Amino acid sequence: MNDHTVSRRKFLIGAAVAAAAVPMLGMAPQARAAALPRLPATNPQAKALGYVADATTTKNAAHKVGSACTNCQFYTAATGACALFAGFSVEPKGWCTAWAKKAG
Ligand code: SF4
């Protein structure tokens, strides 16, 4: 293999990686969030933490009015991810007993 062949191979690999990445840049945050499956209510940790997909429906005494995933420090709006539930996204209007007020 000569230098020219190696350079061409590197170029083609770089072009393929770039082509794969470009469509992600134009996607809305909601579309990227779709990559993470929604946390199922049957998840054992979700049950243990009293997770609900709609904060207004919880009967948990620990719930403070107005608290939801969107204003929780563990929530990442861009992906819908919660730091406590790796590999899943949570409902923006969801809630669980681990809720902690987001700073700012
Ligand atoms: S820790 Fe926060 S973001 Fe995660 S499910 Fe509970 S309330 Fe929602």
Image: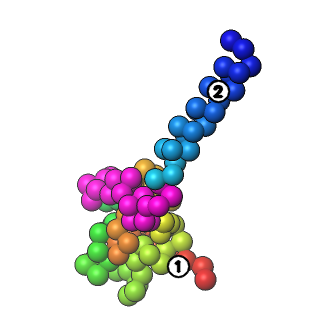
Disc 2 or disc 1, which is closer to the eye? 2
Is the C-beta of the residue carrying label 2 under 8 Å from the nearest atom of ligand 1?
no
For the residues labelled 2 and 1, the Cα–Cα distance comes to 52 Å
Is the C-beta of the residue carrying label 1 under 8 Å from the nearest atom of ligand 1?
no
Disc 1 crowd rating (10 Å Cα; few below 14, some 14-19, many 20+) is some
Task: Tell me the element at label 1.
Answer: loop
Range of magenta residues: 24-45
**Picture coordinates of residue 103, whole percent (x, y):** 60, 79
Looking at the figure, which quarter contains the C terminus?
Answer: bottom right
- For marks 2 and 1, the one nearer the N-term is 2
Ligand 1: quadrant of the figure: bottom left
Q: Which residue is drawn at 51% across and 58% down?
A: 25
Q: Which of 21 and 104 is in front in this view?
A: 21
Q: Is residue 44 above or below residue 3?
A: below
What kind of residue is marked 2?
Answer: Arg
Q: Which of 14 and 73 is in front in this view?
A: 14
Residue tagged 2: 8
Residue tagged 1: 101
What kind of residue is marked 1?
Answer: Lys
Q: In this view, does 66 lie above or below 54?
A: below
